[in-house]
Amino acid sequence: MSTPCNNAMLRRASRMLGQIYDDELAASGLKTTQYSLISQIDRMNEPTLRQLAMEIVMDLSALGHTLKPLIRDGYIALLPDAEDRRVKRVALTKLGKTKLRETRRLWSQAQKRFETVFGESRAAKLRQVLAELSSEDFRQSFNRSE
Amino acid sequence: MSTPCNNAMLRRASRMLGQIYDDELAASGLKTTQYSLISQIDRMNEPTLRQLAMEIVMDLSALGHTLKPLIRDGYIALLPDAEDRRVKRVALTKLGKTKLRETRRLWSQAQKRFETVFGESRAAKLRQVLAELSSEDFRQSFNRSE
DNA sequence: GCTACACACTGGCATATGCCAGTATGTACT
DNA sequence: AGTACATACTGGCATATGCCAGTGTGTAGC
């Protein structure tokens, strides 16, 4: 017999959780994807596009596209690197930082409700598993398994 | 302290697994998302668009868009329902069924490697958790938790 | 300095996904 | 039958994500 597709189930759960979190963030005008991106940029110290892309396991050009609306709306800016002229660094603008603080309240509420409904301990375990699947180590192991 | 975003981590893992499975399916010309869709349609008995959308937790209009390329390529067809003229049912064409059988081999390989690297038992548990998160019950519980 | 090659990003095209505003159809109530 | 409302889908617009083919820039070897 064949097992249900792990990838399909992961995507399905992503859609569900995306819808749920997006509902909570609706008032902010940010999608959860955008909030997560801004939040991640805030946690890193003016990362290069590549560093950011690696961290969130996103294709470099996909990241570029995704950043466009956020740049247009003035939340983030791309700064040329001082050393290497090929490199651009991603930074939050003042407006972006403000937006992040505001939106964090809505996000916290979604997150809190998730933890309540799903269970804090289970959520922590789930995040651990998801981190493992998102690691380069996992990709390597997978690729070496052939 | 604040926990890492459950939704962001889920999406990140989805991107990773998507890339991994897509690599395996590359030779088929189908994306994993498309394979999963065809496979799901095959498992259901000529579902209506709405039934299919509910099952995979996808917005109805998003589903409509996603089906377009597969219809264009002749893998699936939309059939009018006999009883209710508002309704359209989704069916695999002969070509679609053939493609499904062919592509299943590649998918099985990805799935098998996943189970090997991640562990069969852990994978089963993960799917269980993902199914829970994808359920309408979960959405209801979440919405009622406010 | 020149040539190859590696690396970082950009642009174009395609699919994935969602929201909202229609359009068509069915159903309930009068 | 007629009106009001519910339901199923469609189309337009926007973002999310990926691949591939550039373009510009650094670097190693000659």
Image (tube, coloured by chain):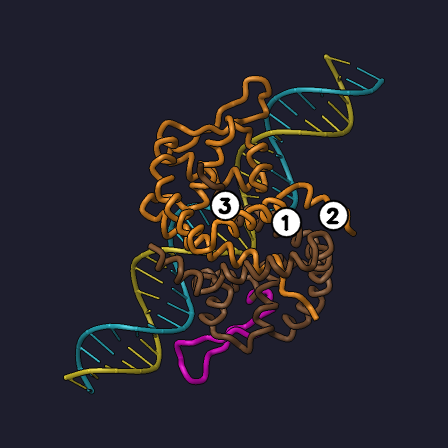
Chain colours: A orange, B brown, C yellow, D cyan
> Residue at label 3?
B8
Amino acid type, callout 2: Asn
Q: CA distance from mark 2 to mark 1?
A: 12 Å
Query: Mark 1 or 3, which is nearer the eye?
Result: 3
Q: Are marks 2 and 1 in contact (CB under 8 Å)?
A: no
Q: Mark 2 to mark 3: distance in Å?
A: 24 Å
- Can residue B123 be seen in this snapshot? yes
Picture coordinates of residue D28, whole percent (x, y): 77, 20
One can see residue B74 in this view: no
A86 shown above or below B54: above
Q: Which residues are magenta?
A: B71-91
- Image quadrant occupied by the N terminus of chain B: top left
**Of the residues shown, which amino acid type is indicated by label 3?**
Ala
Identity of the residue drawn at 50% across and 77% down: B79
Residue B78 is covered by the magenta coloring: yes
Vertical order, A110 against D2 (above or below): above
Disc 3 chain ID: B
Q: Are marks 1 and 3 in contact (CB under 8 Å)?
A: no
| Left or right of B4 in this view: B143 | left
For residue A34, what is the image quadrant?
Answer: top left
Which of the chains bears the disc numbered 2? A
Q: Is residue A144 left or right of residue A38?
A: right
Q: Position of residue A17 (x, y in %)?
A: 46, 54
Q: Which residue is mark 2?
A: A143
Q: Secondary structure at mark 2?
A: helix
What residue did someone put label 1 on? B19
Chain letter for the residue marked with disc 1 in the picture: B
Q: Is residue A120 left or right of residue D13?
A: right
State whether discs 2 and 3 lie on one chain: no
Specify few, some or many for label 2: CA neighbours under 10 Å numbering under 14, 14-19, or 20 or more: some
